[in-house]
Image (cartoon, rainbow, N blue to C red):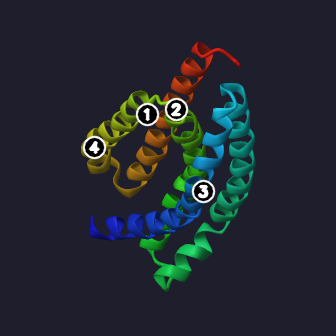
Amino acid sequence: SFEAAGAYAVAERIYSATKSLYQPISTALFPAIGSHFITGVKNGVTFACWTGMRSFIIFFIICSVTFFASKPLVVFFMGEETSSAQIASRCLEIIAFIPAISIVSNIAGMQILVNLSHDRPFTICTVVGVLLMLSGVFLVVPAFGAIGAAYLLLAVESVVAVLMCGCALHYVRRVAWV
């Protein structure tokens, strides 16, 4: 329904605002992490992981605030508490931690795989996520609406994070720890 779509859109805007906070950090980290890879894979991976862990902790706290404040945030942006605000609040609770999950994907994918010149696995993981999302939209959303879309987004982002981590571990193990 249009009401559910509007509710999801509100939750997704709040989630996107939270996620967009990390983009400039990621852009700034890429050359810094890359410079550590020049001195050796072990230095690069270690720096990327420590930096990622600190970023993850900070964003986990931000995501927790978003989760616990989902209802007031949605009411603030929608203007009143309606049934669509309840749907939006539930959607936001479901997707609130995706920015923290995305940091894991970013560290494993962009910061490690791309810095090790393994662009292909990074691209494949990303394409798998897009294909899962596209196919899921046609299967999940008609049956489960906005809540289904939120769970789908959470599932796809989680799968992409696991794939990126698996690829990063695979390629890091193949490289000599110099």
In primary-sequence order, the first of circles 3 and 4 is: 3
Residue shown at 36%/30% (left/top)?
Answer: 124
Q: Nearer the viewer, mark 3 or mark 1?
A: 3
Q: Furthest-bottom residue in view? A: 79
The circle on residue 122 is: 1
Instruction: Please give the residue where the numbered disc 4 appears in the rendered image.
Output: 134
Task: Find residue 81 and report its horizontal and vertical position in percent.
Answer: 51, 80
- Asked if residue 33 is positioned above or below residue 174 in the image, the reply reads below
Instruction: Please give the residue where the numbered disc 3 appears in the rendered image.
Output: 28
- Asked if residue 32 is positioned above or below residue 67 in the image, the reply reads above
Q: What residue type is labelled 2?
A: Leu
Q: How far apart are marks 3 and 2 (CA)?
A: 17 Å
Task: Find residue 51 and report its horizontal and vertical position in percent.
Answer: 72, 45
Task: Find residue 101 and report its horizontal and vertical position in percent.
Answer: 58, 45
Q: In the image, is 154 to the left or to the right of 25?
A: left
In primary-sequence order, the first of circles 3 and 2 is: 3
Answer yes or no: do the residues labelled 3 and 1 have beta carbons within 8 Å?
A: no
In primary-sequence order, the first of circles 1 and 4 is: 1
Residue shown at 56%/27% (left/top)?
Answer: 168
Answer yes or no: do the residues labelled 3 and 4 have beta carbons within 8 Å?
A: no
Quadrant hosting residue 75: bottom right
In primary-sequence order, the first of circles 4 and 2 is: 2
